[in-house]
Image: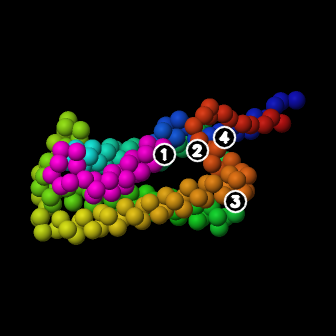
Amino acid sequence: MAELHLPVTRKRYDSLTLSLHWLTAACVIFLFASAHVWEWLERGTPLRKGLQAVHISCGILLTLIVVVRVAWRFTGRRSPSRAMPAPAGSPATRLLAGSVHAALYGLLAAQIVLGFLFRWAQHEPFTFFGLVDLSGWVEVSPALRHDFGEWHNAVAWAIIALVFVHALAALVHHYLLKDDTLRRMMPGRATTGGQRK
């Protein structure tokens, strides 16, 4: 009797998806923390300016990561070999999780745009680790600097709040519901599963 091979599904996301997810998390945490750390440093000091330069460069890096992540989500991850089973939970729970993800992507996009506009409005050096100079690519009035700075800060807090909710939900799935939601996104061998009839 011929064997019927059912579709193989992965138990963890592929390595690129995992890398982009955790790089995004690391960038977001560093950007948020560094923006608050330099408030404790004296204005005009090399340490404060250096931290701000690294913050700006990591903001540009986050831009690249988000672009690649969105492109991969809608292209590479659709491959049958990278198929994942539907996440655990009711349709309402999955809808809520999807809404949180969509909100995070939207807020990250808004934060990136605001960060660029804020820096251009400051009319100060705007480089990517000293390798690429983005200064003056777009002319933004210095009069808007304060507004862009306020919006940039407000969106940062909104992102951190959603990240907290996202992380808390993953812990609830892992420790209370005891499903594979958190393990799917943890580093490790991307094992697959399947059955034969």
Q: Which residues fall within the magenta stretch?
A: 21-48
Q: Is residue 145 rendered to the left or right of residue 70?
A: left
| Residue type for callout 1 | His
Q: Amino acid at mark 2?
A: Met
- 60 sits to left or right of 138: right
Tell me, yes or no, whether the two marked residues, 4 and 1, touch with CB atoms within 8 Å.
no
Residue that badge 2 annotates: 185
Q: Main secondary structure of the magenta part?
A: helix
Question: Above or below — where is 23 with respect to 159?
Answer: above
Query: What scheme was used to colour the molecule?
Result: rainbow
**Disc 4 or disc 1, which is closer to the eye?**
1
Tell me which numbered mark, 4 or 3, is placed earlier along the sequence: 4
Return the disc, 1 or 3, that comes first in the chain's sequence: 1
Using the numbered discs, state the Cα–Cα distance from disc 2 to disc 1 in whole angstroms.
8 Å
Marks 4/3: CA–CA distance = 16 Å
- Circle 4 sits on which residue? 11
Neighbourhood count class around disc 3 (C-alpha, 10 Å): few under 14, some 14–19, many 20 upward? some
Q: Quadrant of the C terminus?
A: top right
> Which residue is found at the position 37% from the left and 61% from the top?
156
**Residue flagged by tag 4: what amino acid is it?**
Lys
Q: Secondary structure at mark 4?
A: loop
Determine contact: label 4, label 3, CB under 8 Å: no
Q: Position of residue 62 (x, y in %)?
A: 35, 47
**Whole-Å distance between the Cαs marked 3 and 2?**
16 Å
Q: Secondary structure at mark 2?
A: helix
Q: Which element carries disc 3, helix, strand or loop?
A: loop
- Would you name the residue on which mark 3 appears? 89
Residue 147: horizontal and vertical position, in percent? Answer: 22, 70
* Residue of label 1: 21
Q: Are marks 2 and 1 in contact (CB under 8 Å)?
A: yes
Q: Residue furthest right?
A: 1
Residue 184 in the figure: left or right of residue 33: right
